Amino acid sequence: MIRTFFLLPFLLFLFYSCPMNKKENTIDDSERYIQLATDIKYSNYNRNIYNTKAFNLLKNKRNDSLNREQLFRVARVYNDINEREEFKKVVITILDRSTNNGNQIHFSKACNYLGSYYKNKSVLDSAFIFYNKSIKFLCKYKDYKSLTNSLLHVAFIQFVEGKYMECEVASIDALRYAELISDKDYEYNALIMLANSLSERGDYGNSLKRNVQAYRLLDENDPTDRRNIQLSLNNIGNAYKSLENFSESIHYFVLALAGKEKPKEEESLILYATLLDNLAYSKFKIKEYHDVLPLYLKALAIRKEIGYSHDIITTNIHLSEYYWAVTNDTLKAQKLANEAFKIGLSSKLPHYTLEALKHLILIDQKNTPTYTQLYVKINDSLQLEERRNRNKFARIAYETDEIIKEKDIAVRQKQLVSGVSSGVGVIILLLFIIKYQRDKQKELSYFHEQQKTTESIYRLIHDRQRKIDEGRQAEKKRIALELHDGVMNKLTSTRLNLFILKKSRNSQTINRCLDFIKDIQSIEVEIGLVAQDLNKDVFSDGNSFNIMLASLLEGFKEITECNIHHQIDKTIDWENLEPAMKMNLYRVIQEAIHNCIKYANAQNIYITILKKAKTISIKLVDDGIGFDKKQINPGAGIKNMKDRIESLSGKIHIRAKKDSGTSISITLSIVES
């Protein structure tokens, strides 16, 4: 049972580790191309080439987490070098792979990227769809930074679409998460978006409060915050302007413009023109006309240079108000208002078109009915479109929730399938373990049976050897008796008959019998020696194991030129030892000598078997080439030797060193039968 506990973790390790590929130590081509594409020292043209090569390689690789992370990096490079369509292709690939793999974190991140793509393309409904999907998953997985980013984008889309209440809700959520992760940049953007939505809803007091709160997050000594400081001062000035506190608004617009020359960057130039227009409008409202017209004209020139239609419309309307109210130049006022109206129509900016019409109704009384009809028509169309958009975005939100639910169901189904598959795998593994254990038990049972059979064979060999010895002994005695009783008796009789010499001692008789007597005596001595030798018991020690061992050594000597020297303690009573012990010891010595002859190239093998108290000590030493135990795995022969000695509760130690021979030491406790 103990073996099962050790075997199970090992098999589980094999089961889960076999399919996995080893991680390569070197950077693959796709990673190398990504690194080249990311390096800004190269031109955008070369970066695009490297990035495309990386993308083509990654498309053909296995869909895993590392692959998708690399694809995100490729997408970011395309975004940096303004390859928007290629950016979209990569993100759609990630989205498909995340959907197939069930990785909702990568799925939500890809949705965020696609939302950014469609937002930049001004396809706001598609942008809203993907941002909304992203938000649902990011809420679930508590990725608050990405969630804040997506919420800000959704708030912006809702603001552009005129859904200021929804924009306010999204901005508050973004602000809450930004504060949670202590990100001042996101917190600032959320406050600005919230302030703008409050302003559009007419809540100018709270808008001012949020703008001031955003301004306090900025650091005047930080160069990266300078534009945001100027933007916040403009927003605060706008809030005061909406509250008709024009003195305060002028203060903040002047503060934002203080020491600022006309900037070169487009974004800064847009803000600069806005500040000029706002300052001029605030001064116009409190009738400080002395520099209003130059400010308006400067702002209009910049806005025409940039080409932003809605900004041009705003300045044209403000200039029209100025000419109508201050200089009484009605024709110029009407011309500017009509120009603003036409730009609004051609640019499809209904809100700005309505502002232009509202001013035309006031200053062009001759065409007031026409402008009024147009105003009502456009306003009704705009309200209808807003209702459609409101329903469209509500439908998108609902459909997104449905998609999330379907995806959750799909994920749960996939988890269920994975769980069932894992369960089946575990059951198969357990069945394999059970089968393995049963086979192991059969093997052990077979081994025990083999041991019993070996012992029985040894006993049979021992009994056979004993009977052979008894037969040989009996035969030797029979021959000895035959010699003694037959030949010896005859020879003795002949010798006795020759005692005639006692009766006749003449020279002739003596000479005749002397040689014969000597011959007979020689034969008698020779036969006596033969009889004595045949009658001698070479196994008088009654120790057949010594005979078997000697026979084994003699057999090895016949097949090898190696000299085998052995010394066996004669005090060991082999006959009283357990048969299993003698049999295993016999096999161990046989295997050790066999290994020496086969592998060691030894000239001499020394075998010593000694008895020490209640133990038998066996030592086999050769002067062969030896081996390095660290480099050579032990074979079946050495393993069997160890198993046999361990089965006798003995100890075996093998010392080997390359070019220094091998020594095997064995210690066994004596177990008598």
Image (cartoon, rainbow, N blue to C red):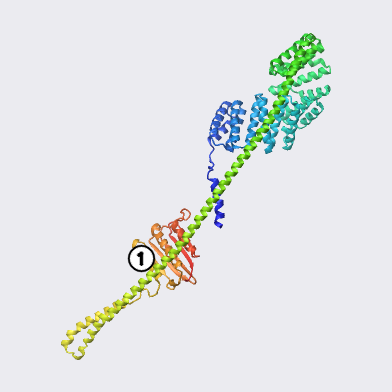
Answer left or right for 448 relative to 306.
left
Q: Which residue, given by chain and number where applicable, does mark 1 sit on?
A: 554
How far across and how far down the image is residue 268, in percent? 71, 23
How many residues crowd mark 1 within 10 Å: few (<14), some (14–19), many (20+)? few
- Residue 179 or residue 663, whichever sits in front: 179
The answer to whether 67 is drawn above or below residue 464 in the figure is: above
Answer left or right for 61 relative to 108.
left
Give the residue at x 34% y 63%.
Answer: 558
How far across and how far down the image is residue 249, in percent? 81, 23
The answer to whether 142 is drawn above or below residue 467 in the figure is: above
Toward which corner of the image does residue 142 lie, by quadrant?
top right
Observer able to see residue 416? yes
The answer to whether 384 is drawn above or below residue 545 in the figure is: above
How far across and how far down the image is residue 117, in percent? 64, 27
Answer left or right for 657 relative to 535.
right
- Residue 561 or residue 139, whichever sits in front: 139
Answer left or right for 287 relative to 578.
right
Q: Amino acid at mark 1?
A: Glu
Observer able to see residue 572? no
- Residue 1 or residue 173, whichever sits in front: 1
* Secondary structure found at label 1: helix
How far across and how far down the image is residue 284, in percent? 81, 17
Toward which corner of the image does residue 534 lie, by quadrant?
bottom left
Residue occupying the far bottom of the picture: 503
